[in-house]
Amino acid sequence: QVQLVESGGGMVQAGGSLRLSCAASGRTFSNYAMGWFRQAPGKEREFVAAISWRGGTTFYAPSVKGRFTISRDNAKNTLYLQMNSLTPEDTALYYCGKGRTILASTVENEYDAWGQGTQVTVSS
């Protein structure tokens, strides 16, 4: 079993930046792809970014591409999401997820463990 704990969320003005972290414990972090998803009030959870087990492959949602960067440090068992040029539309609860395999995926069903989420609020 793996435990995931997100941190780094907060309130920021439009145009600002935040870096989210996801600390993993339990199963070997480096054996799995990881991803970030988000859920805004009244909306379904949506894909944000994904990274393969060694970081060689990354995927981004069109709405965040060029502004967000996903990365991982397997030595520290930590996943990151650097978010720049934030807009109010980025306001959501952000979750990190553990992939079922080594392959990065944009599909929520390809993830089998989730953290509790960290809130990001962007004011205009």
Image: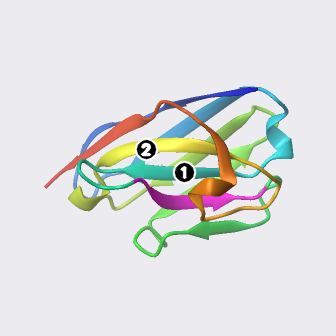
Residue flagged by tag 1: what amino acid is it?
Answer: Trp
> Which residue is at the far front?
109
Residue holding disc 1: 36
Residue at image position (23%, 51%) is 42
Q: Is residue 65 above or below residue 2?
A: below
Q: Quadrant of residue 107?
A: bottom right
- 72 sits to left or right of 84: right
Residue at image position (67%, 63%) is 105
Tell me which segment is drawn in magenta.
45-52
Q: Nearer the viewer, residue 3 or 108?
A: 108
Task: Report x, y in % for residue 78.
Answer: 68, 36
Magenta region, main secondary structure: strand
Q: Quadrant of residue 85?
A: bottom left
Residue at image position (42%, 51%) is 38
- N-term-proximal mark, 1 vs 2: 1
Which element carries disc 1, helix, strand or loop?
strand
Q: Is residue 57 above or below residue 39?
A: below
Which element carries disc 2, helix, strand or loop?
strand
Residue 55, magenta (yes or no) = no
Task: Report x, y in % for residue 124.
Answer: 13, 55
* The N terminus - image quarter: top right
Q: Residues within 10 Å of mark 1 (few under 14, many from 20)?
A: many
- 40 sits to left or right of 32: left
Q: Is residue 5 above or below residue 91?
A: above
Cα separation, mark 1 vs mark 2, equals: 7 Å
Residue flagged by tag 2: what amino acid is it?
Answer: Tyr
Residues marked 1 and 2 touching at CB (< 8 Å): yes
Residue holding disc 2: 94
Name the image colouring: rainbow
- 60 sits to left or right of 24: left
Task: Report x, y in % for residue 2.
Answer: 72, 28
